[in-house]
Image (cartoon, rainbow, N blue to C red):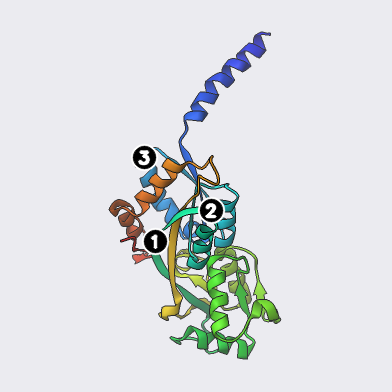
Amino acid sequence: MGVIVRVLLAVLLVVPAYAQQKFIMVASTTSTEQSGLFKHILPIFEKKTGIDVRVVAQGTGQALDTGRRGDADVVFVHAKTQEEKFIAEGHGVKRYEVMYNDFVLVGPKKSDPAQADGMKDIVAALKKIQDAKAPFASRGDRSGTHSAELRLWKLAGYDPAKEKPSWYRETGSGMGPTLNTAAGMGAYTLTDRGTWLSFKNRGPLDILVEGDKRLFNQYGVILVNPAKHPHVKKEMGQAFIDWLISPEGQKAIADYKISGQQLFFPNAS
């Protein structure tokens, strides 16, 4: 009996402490996680507010599905059309723009079978990859990057996800693993610049195409609708959003650099 009493007392002491712990769940993209951005900005927010931010890093499509199920308080993603649909369906309250960077086409610079190096037209570069039947690694995971890639292929007049040519490989994984696959295959791939700058295992890969306005990559943040999911931590989730778009949060984003290069550019205003 004494043992049981001691166990009960231990439980009673632990439960209140656990219940008082303040945290939110944020479903976000692999690019914000793998680029190292969250490791830089979250400690600043957590120190200021005492709110612990727990991140589930997924492709944008999966992150929005996590929000649809009510398994996150906030979604922080980068596919505006999908985000607007999420809100129209009643799953989100309001979309706030937070920051941007851009996509780049990377590939094997020395061999460059599609001769894409130095091109400024991403659509023309994709057409050359198709014509050369050069290996291309796609995320294939419904992420924001995957959506952008398919949109660009459509502009090039081709749908590799439907046609499934032998030179087109869908990894079904995040940006880091897809870059690893591309490096191992000597393949081309589309990546966000932030993940590329933080990626170390580049092998033969280098940036070949950049600067096309169609490579613009906007990030948005949305509170999951508490009217649809009453357990959503509305106040703490909104506090995180308000901080991200505040001057302090925007400065924290701008201050994150790798080798002196800024990875994300705040544009909440």
Compare marks 1 and 3 and give the one earlier in the sequence. Answer: 3
Residue at 65% x, 80% y is 160
Q: Do callouts 1 and 2 mark residues in contact (Cβ within 8 Å)? A: no
* C-alpha gap between disc 2 and disc 3: 26 Å
Q: Secondary structure at mark 1?
A: strand
List the residue tagged with mark 3: 49
Place of residue 234 in the rendered image (x, y in percent of width and height, measured from the top left): 45, 43
Tell me the quarter of the image containing the C terminus.
Answer: bottom left
* C-alpha gap between disc 1 and disc 2: 17 Å
Q: Amino acid at mark 2?
A: His
Q: Secondary structure at mark 3?
A: helix
Of badges 1 and 2, the one in the foreground is 2
Residue at 65% x, 71% y is 170
Q: Amino acid at mark 1?
A: Glu
- Crowdedness of circle 1 by 10 Å Cα count: few (<14), some, many (20+)? many
Relative height, residue 6 to residue 215 (above, below): above
Place of residue 13 in the rendered image (x, y in percent of width and height, measured from the top left): 53, 20
Compare marks 2 and 3 and give the one earlier in the sequence. Answer: 3
Q: Amino acid at mark 3?
A: Thr
Residue at 57% x, 70% y is 146
Q: Secondary structure at mark 2?
A: loop
Tell me the quarter of the image containing the N terminus.
Answer: top right
List the residue tagged with mark 2: 91
Instruction: Name the side, left or right, on which 51 lies relative to 110.
Output: left
Place of residue 43 in the rendered image (x, y in percent of width and height, measured from the top left): 39, 45
